[in-house]
Image: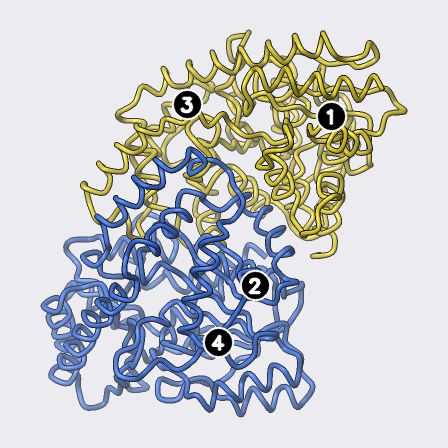
Chain colours: A blue, B yellow
Amino acid sequence: MKQMVQQTATRISESLNQSRGVELTPLQSALAVAADADVLSLAMGLPDPSLFPVSAIQEAVARVLSFSRSALQYTLPCETLKKKICSLMLDRGVDCSPDCIFLTSGAQQAISLVSTLLLSIGSSIVEEELSYPNFQCLVDSFRPQILRVPTNSTCGIDVDVVEKLLVKGVRPALIYVMATAHNPLGVTLSRDKRRRLALLAREFEVPIVEDDPYGALFYDIEPIPSLCSFDQQWIYYVGSFSKILCPSLRVGWVVAPEECIKPLSIIKEGCDLNISTFSQWIVNDFLDSENIVGHTELLRKVYRGKRDAMNAALEKHMPQNVHWEIPACGIFFWLDLPEHVNASALLSRCVSEEKVAFLPAEAFSRNKRSNGMRLNFSHRSIDQITEGVARIGRVLHR
Amino acid sequence: MKQMVQQTATRISESLNQSRGVELTPLQSALAVAADADVLSLAMGLPDPSLFPVSAIQEAVARVLSFSRSALQYTLPCETLKKKICSLMLDRGVDCSPDCIFLTSGAQQAISLVSTLLLSIGSSIVEEELSYPNFQCLVDSFRPQILRVPTNSTCGIDVDVVEKLLVKGVRPALIYVMATAHNPLGVTLSRDKRRRLALLAREFEVPIVEDDPYGALFYDIEPIPSLCSFDQQWIYYVGSFSKILCPSLRVGWVVAPEECIKPLSIIKEGCDLNISTFSQWIVNDFLDSENIVGHTELLRKVYRGKRDAMNAALEKHMPQNVHWEIPACGIFFWLDLPEHVNASALLSRCVSEEKVAFLPAEAFSRNKRSNGMRLNFSHRSIDQITEGVARIGRVLHR
């Protein structure tokens, strides 16, 4: 088990990590590159720290600490925060009760706990050919049979193939889907695809885990209702405050059928006993006192500008044979490179020749697809984005 | 798997939960009772909130937020905090490098990650007959063979039995030990037992997980060096700031052989991606600016007074046939009740007749031992402790 997890992780970190002596995990490797002042990294999916509402958080801390010493104690999950999350879910098209909300230490824990709930040793799962590596890593510990489904940055997951599998009689323990702002592909599924996926989940009684950290970050279109809005019995929704407030408070949530909340709580207590009361209360206070609508509008405005700047830079600097779509939501561009280009090898050259980094296709692909790269546009300034893309372009043209 | 976890959890929560309509986990049941103003609960292992260094934490937050916006970002684990933990470990008799420190979201996550590292499906583990229920709960998901070893509140784990098992050829994946301030028994192992356990671990190459959340809370004796101080290759040490600073920052740590740190990081990333930078930095700042030695001295002084008050109340109110030891460390008294007394039934009577709560033996026992109870003395005031024990005494005398 440990070995399998290690293999997935090694695959991801190898390219970023190869020039370093220390042993780091994939995330740590990427964070180390991101923190390296010498390298202009577009690799990590980090939010822009200049948008963190620092003084609002400072004020929330002061109120929370003066309200009650229980802010620092073990406590029950915060009921008022659950209610406020229900309001946020209305924006995602979901009308749910606080009894269906389960608070977690970030979205990753949410995905991990839901996967633990749904998976047994030897279950099968449906996963896209390019998918979020930290999901792959965590499900590997259950040694699942992986049913890989085609996907791309234009239309996303191939629902026809999912349907064929289910019609054939395959019953995966879960289907992992990022319907909005796919990581790494950036694609957002059409309303029609969402409806079809939800119908399939219900018809074949197969749970879908909808990972939706970027649901509030939409730029051109009105937000499409979440997958969960089409079926609340079979879709397990995962949300997070990491991208709309800040990552380090580690507050995320699950929307799940009410009967799942106690089993999830029991699994969570085994994992880390108690959610941070302090963090929950800070988020709860922030949602009270700050205009969260105004804050997410600001995020969308700034990130839209960065997205457009990255697109302009790509148009200027990329060779003709590189293909991309403009993401309507989220924080990533996906670049399809010509078949002969190995993005991991390209990354090594980019780091050494031009001091610029991205994440190569291999990081997201179990079958070692190599000709693609993910570029983040939320973290860096517009000048850095433009400069970073220009550097990658120079290496590609060499 | 889920069913087994559920069974263990149900066993624990049944007695506390039976009068309630809502479905709660064991911890939640106990927290709900603790939060119920009508019930004087001595059940939970909560620290005294009046001892939380609220203004020092408030000041630390201000410094941390003004230092860098990275306080709210995903980051690498805090190296200076690791160094400060190395200094704290010197007090536990361990001289280790920061490269052997792994930061976690509290001690429970530390135990969970180390167990995930060491256990495979179907492994065996050595556990005391009375042990920490959230350890039992988390290892259940690996369906281990449980090798139960006798223990008591006078001497702790029966090392002779452990030795016999190992000599017989049994090779458990891990032995779970609370050498200092056992939960629930309150007992602290002698130096001789520690030495013997560490020698057995080394001789038979069997890892011991040393769970040490109360190591700094010693009252009569000079602290005995941790089990880990006798062998750093085979003892995995788990520490926490929950009881010496506050629980809700969720910062704990593992001291493990250096080669385990990367595998632990990979498992942790699958579980919850990133430790809270904010929490780590607050603890790090607190350790800089506050006299941690002075703070733990204050904790010891106050808790010693509470322990002595509970002992005096027990002497006054308990029937002759109830036995207990005065704990030298930690936050719990363990009461051995006469064989015919079922503590779970007693708890129901105590809650309904006298509005007082404790944790019954069944919560800690896989083989349903019923004639014992755990009383916490850290959480409540001396008046409440005295009153609570008097109430339990009244029910026992009826």
Tell whether label 3 touches label 1 (CB within 8 Å).
Answer: no
Q: Mark 4 packing: few (<14 Cα in 10 Å), some, or many (20+)?
A: many
Q: Is residue B112 left or right of A313 when viewed as pictured?
A: right
Tell whether label 2 touches label 3 (CB within 8 Å).
Answer: no
Q: Earlier in the sequence, mark 4 or mark 2?
A: 2
Q: Mark 2 packing: few (<14 Cα in 10 Å), some, or many (20+)?
A: some
Please give the chain letter of the residue carrying mark 1: B
Mark 2 = which residue?
Answer: A100
Check disc 1 and give the amino acid type: Met
Please provide percent x and percent y for residue A156. Answer: 41, 85
**Nearer to us: label 1 or label 2:** 2
Tell whether label 4 touches label 3 (CB within 8 Å).
Answer: no
Check disc 2 and give the amino acid type: Cys
Rendered image quadrant of residue A278:
top left
**Nearer to us: label 3 or label 4:** 4
Mark 3 = which residue?
Answer: B95
